[in-house]
Amino acid sequence: MTHAVKISGTGSYLPEKVLTNYDLEKMVDTTHEWIHSRSGISERHIAAEGEATSHMSAAAARNALDAAGITAEDLDMIIVGTITPDMVFPNTACFVQNQIGAPNAFCFDVEAACSGFLYAIDIARNYISNGSAKHVLVIGAEKLSSITDWEDRSTCVLFGDGAGAVVLSVADEGERGIMGTVMGSDGRLNELLNVPGGGSRHPASHQTVDDRMHYMKMAGREVFKHAVRCMSDAATTVLAKAGLTVDDVACIIPHQANARIINAIASRLGTKDGIVYMNLERVGNMSAASVPVALDEAVREGRIKRGDIVLFVAFGGGFTWGASVLEW
Ligand code: UT7
């Protein structure tokens, strides 16, 4: 028997410290005008020293559990989408399990860069749908400040830290919940966006540190083009798969990499005005945390109401991409 799967609660957490474009002007050769006009970003949150991805995840998780009206003991699984785990291992989800007290959950991370949260939702949905789980905590969380090269103006102006979480549960009678998902990858383009050092290919050494290989590298202009194409295509495909058109959609929550990318996707899809949710001006690009943080804000602001059709779409390193459509 298959079950419909819904989001039963959302939560998010942003670290206290805010880094503005004017602060960045003092760190690298840039201006607020350049950053804002090219990306739409004005400021981003930066985790405190000692504040790890799991700590931000646990804070977001507690909010999502409250909103869902369940306790951590009710969880069957915890999945964290992240490229900035606390450690190489154990996985970040195990750290979250320990912090929130979820003894009945099994835990693992998904590494699909900015698409990590959508990939994790898709996995969780399958477990619930086939009856293997009832409640799954899915988190997208990043401490991108820990892999940002603060001397590279082409990347350091873009990223921020934060965490978003949802609880996925069996939908009630008559609720459609998640209506369709589309996921894709293209490993041929791995060179365009990556962190080359610190893994098994280039293990950490004095040389890799001297060569700044533990920081994010991005060919921005190239990534931009692929992001627009892949997210537009994924959104179009997932709507068709669910038997919907863009006119049925009440709210689009896209990955928050760049306002120009989001506007290009909206124009390709032909969306109505005002349905695309954007928070990147205040939070920057938070990779796997972008979609769930934006979702939680949209829900708490009343931008998403019961019965609304909501579309998520994301794209990131790998390349990876994905889209999901659901009835709220
Ligand atoms: O989340 C995963 C997916 N990531 C993305 O989707 C990000 C995709 N890429 C982008 O969002 C954009 O490509 C950026 C915002 C990263 C860059 O915008 P752009 O319009 O593509 O600029 P560009 O890289 O073509 O650079 C234009 C100029 C260059 O100077 P020249 O060669 O024209 O003289 C750069 O050196 O801007 C210069 N530049 C800067 N100037 C001031 C690059 N970074 C900066 C900076 N401040 N921070």
Image: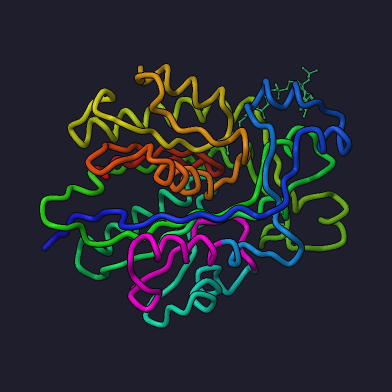
The picture places residue 121, in percent across and down from the top left corner, at 37, 54
Quadrant containing the C terminus in the rendered view? top left
Q: Which residue is drawn at 54% across and 76% down?
A: 99
Residue 90 in view: yes
> In x, y percent, where is residue 319?
52, 40
Name the side, left or right, on which 102 lies relative to 90: left
Is residue 79 located in the magenta-colored stretch of the structure?
yes
Q: Which residue is drawn at 81% across and 33% down?
A: 22
* 144 or 91, nearer to the observer: 144
Quarter residue 193 falls in: top right
- In this rendering, the answer to whether 175 lies above or below 169 is above
Q: Is residue 139 above or below residue 72?
A: above
In this orientation, which residue lies closer to the viewer: 234 or 27?
27
- Ligand 1 quadrant in view: top right
Q: In which quarter of the image is residue 167?
A: bottom left
Could you tell me which residue is drawn at 79 percent across and 34 percent down? 153
Tell which of 162 and 128 is nearer to you: 162
Q: Is residue 290 magenta?
A: no
Q: Which residues make up the magenta segment?
A: 57-86
Q: Where is residue 231, by image quadrant?
A: top left
Q: In which quarter of the image is the N terminus?
A: bottom left
